[in-house]
Image (cartoon, rainbow, N blue to C red):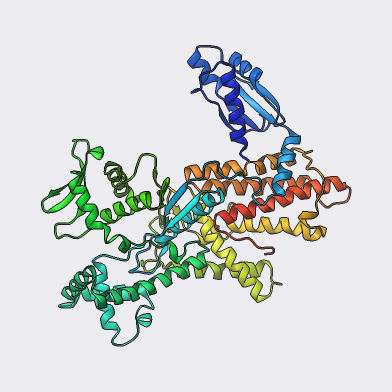
């Protein structure tokens, strides 16, 4: 159910019936102030200006043609032509009753399901995952979960970096290490291993030449070299899988489509671009000159797809990937959850793929850019010594901190239960702190704020869920046993009902605009509306009739279900007690 869309359709039909041009559609939005209806429709003023007529008179004509049905109780004209919409209490109650007895909470699946490819996480397998991989991983996963919930076919693409010149350096070092230990021991700490290899590459005589030789062997398909490379990749992927498991992220090994998967297509792609005249040779390199991205002086933007020495670049691999996603995966929409520093590169990739005919205009290409996680000093988040923060260490610390808080809050919990709750709280806190921020902005990382049980945080929402569920334990009744209609007698009940009924339209908005913080804001506002309702409307106290109790318990049940579903779409778990 998407109330905004239902109202938009009704008012669009009324405007057409009133003789208003189709392009002058209504703008429907939730009312921002009490007393101005539940929703507002604006469109009369814009149409009146276009038609050179009085906006209030035109608003009246729209009302004459409006089919209120069971949905709308009344509509009032305000100011110069605003239409304040009051929804029917009975209709609202019926919608909520249907939602609380439905697994999908009455959220309709997409009428036209699409194939959506999401490129996210994409760690470099030469190193362990660090905090720089957090945002892409959890934002991408939230979008994947939400779009799947809506009924779209989602194809996750983990475009891992597993190829290139750096692997020659790493394989040369690994071959030496294997003389003393097995691969798993040698690669136990990828960061240490990488630093050791880099030091040797920079300082050890002859090592750089050996490393370059390994690159040639690797690219040439040398059997022994590929065996070493596969050992390195397998162990690196196992590190990533541990992180994904801790983060409660849905990426699996089958979602990995790494850079190396496109190797065979790269020479084919370059030849096609040369043959079509889209790419040209320039000073020994193969370049696409993009006039579509020319600078102020008219100079086209150069995109190198093959180096003078014959090597390929990220641009080549990304063009091969976009062609594969369009033609083999049949993508209708491709989302790249990649940080803002890659904006120029991705823009070039999008323009070049369209120009080459790899991707038709009907396939949407979207860069879901995001900002940087910052420390208290306003600089990118680092360890105290200035090093990169490993993601595994960050998540472990989150759970440890959460365990202390949970134990303080509920000292009666047994050790096993406390640990499980702490895992959900700690991981949820890290994810929600990120997802609740507008993804295009930088944000300050703060343990204190993210683990707070007050304000717009995961612990607050998880605790709100447990409080609602505790009411049913206290009442000794299961949600499935509730009977009767939902009654909206007080302003707080009505406000909560309106907020609950907006869940579907919020999901539609996030799916369209790819901003998960909109869902976070909604869940926080829902929890706040519930607190206002609970304080004003007794549920289990003496004097409350059975009809009222069952009605209000149904609202409670729907609040709990909506919070659990919403957090679940963000990849955050709830618990029955805290």
Q: Is residue 41 above or below residue 64?
A: below
Residue 216 visible somewhere in the drawing = yes
Taking depth in this image into account, of 436 and 363 the one nearest to the observer is 363
Q: Residue at x 73, y 58 (%)?
A: 469
Taking depth in this image into account, of 531 and 421 the one nearest to the observer is 421
Q: Is residue 235 left or right of residue 34?
A: left
Q: Is residue 158 left or right of residue 219?
A: right
Q: Position of residue 553 (x, y in %)?
A: 78, 50
Q: Position of residue 36 (x, y in %)?
A: 66, 29
Q: Classify the position of the N terminus by image quarter.
A: top right
Kindly indicate the quadrant of the structure image that contains residue 87.
top right
Q: Residue at x 19, y 52 (%)?
A: 271
Residue 368 visible somewhere in the drawing = no
Q: Position of residue 401 (x, y in %)?
A: 56, 68
Q: Residue furthest left?
A: 283
Q: Residue furthest top?
A: 53
Q: Residue at x 59, y 29 (%)?
A: 9
Q: Classify the position of the C terminus by image quarter.
A: bottom right
Q: Is residue 405 above or below residue 343?
A: below
């Amino acid at each position: 159910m998407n109330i905004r869309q239902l109202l938009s359709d009704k008012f669009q039909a009324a405007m057409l019936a009133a003789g208003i041009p189709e392009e002058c559609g209504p703008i429907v939005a939730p009312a921002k102030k009490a007393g101005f209806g539940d929703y507002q429709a604006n469109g009369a003023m814009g149409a009146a200006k276009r038609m050179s007529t009085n906006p209030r008179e035109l608003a009246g004509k729209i009302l004459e043609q409006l089919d209120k049905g069971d949905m709308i109780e009344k509509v009032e004209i305000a100011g110069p032509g605003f239409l304040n919409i009051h929804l029917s209490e009975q209709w609202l109650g019926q919608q909520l009753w249907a939602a609380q007895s439905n697994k999908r909470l009455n959220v309709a699946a997409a009428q036209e399901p699409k194939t959506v490819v999401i490129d996210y996480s994409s760690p470099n397998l030469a190193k362990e995952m660090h905090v720089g991989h957090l945002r892409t991983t959890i934002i991408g996963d939230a979008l994947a979960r939400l779009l799947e919930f809506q009924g779209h076919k989602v194809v996750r693409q983990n475009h891992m970096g597993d190829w290139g010149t750096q692997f020659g350096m790493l394989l040369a070092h690994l071959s030496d290490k294997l003389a003393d230990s097995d691969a798993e021991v040698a690669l136990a700490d990828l960061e240490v291993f990488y630093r050791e290899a880099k030091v040797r590459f920079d300082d050890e005589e002859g090592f750089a030449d050996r490393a370059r030789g390994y690159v040639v062997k690797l690219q040439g398909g040398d059997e022994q070299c590929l065996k070493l490379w596969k050992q390195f990749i397998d162990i690196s992927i196992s590190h990533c899988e541990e992180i994904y498991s801790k983060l409660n992220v849905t990426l699996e090994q089958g979602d990995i489509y790494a850079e190396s998967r496109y190797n065979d297509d790269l020479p084919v792609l370059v030849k096609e671009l040369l043959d079509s005249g889209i790419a040209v040779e320039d000073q020994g390199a193969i370049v696409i000159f993009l006039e579509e991205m020319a600078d102020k002086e008219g100079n086209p933007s150069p995109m190198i797809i093959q180096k003078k020495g014959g090597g390929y670049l990220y641009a080549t691999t990304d063009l091969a990937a976009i062609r594969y996603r369009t033609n083999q995966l049949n993508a209708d929409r491709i989302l790249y959850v990649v940080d803002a520093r890659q904006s120029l590169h991705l823009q070039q990739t999008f323009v070049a793929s369209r120009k080459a005919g790899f991707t038709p205009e009907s396939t949407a290409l979207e860069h879901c850019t995001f900002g940087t996680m910052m420390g208290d000093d306003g600089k990118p988040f680092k360890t105290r010594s200035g090093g990169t923060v490993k993601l595994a260490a960050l998540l472990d610390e989150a759970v440890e901190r959460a365990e202390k808080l949970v134990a303080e809050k509920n000292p009666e919990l047994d050790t096993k239960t406390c640990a499980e709750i702490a895992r959900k709280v700690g991981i949820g806190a890290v994810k929600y702190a990120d997802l609740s921020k507008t993804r295009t902005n930088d944000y300050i990382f703060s343990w204190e704020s993210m683990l707070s049980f007050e304000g717009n945080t995961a612990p607050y929402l998880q605790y709100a869920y447990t409080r609602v569920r505790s009411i049913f334990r206290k009442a000794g009744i299961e949600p499935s046993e509730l009977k009767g209609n939902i009654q909206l007698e007080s302003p707080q009940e009505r406000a909560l009902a309106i907020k609950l009924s907006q869940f579907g339209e919020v999901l539609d908005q996030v799916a369209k605009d790819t901003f998960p913080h909109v869902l976070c804001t909604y869940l926080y506002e829902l929890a706040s509306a519930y607190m206002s309702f609970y304080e004003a409307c007794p549920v289990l106290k003496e004097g409350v009739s059975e009809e009222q109790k069952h009605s209000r318990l149904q609202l409670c049940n729907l609040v709990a279900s909506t919070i659990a579903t919403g957090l679940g779409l963000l990849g955050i778990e709830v618990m029955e007690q805290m």
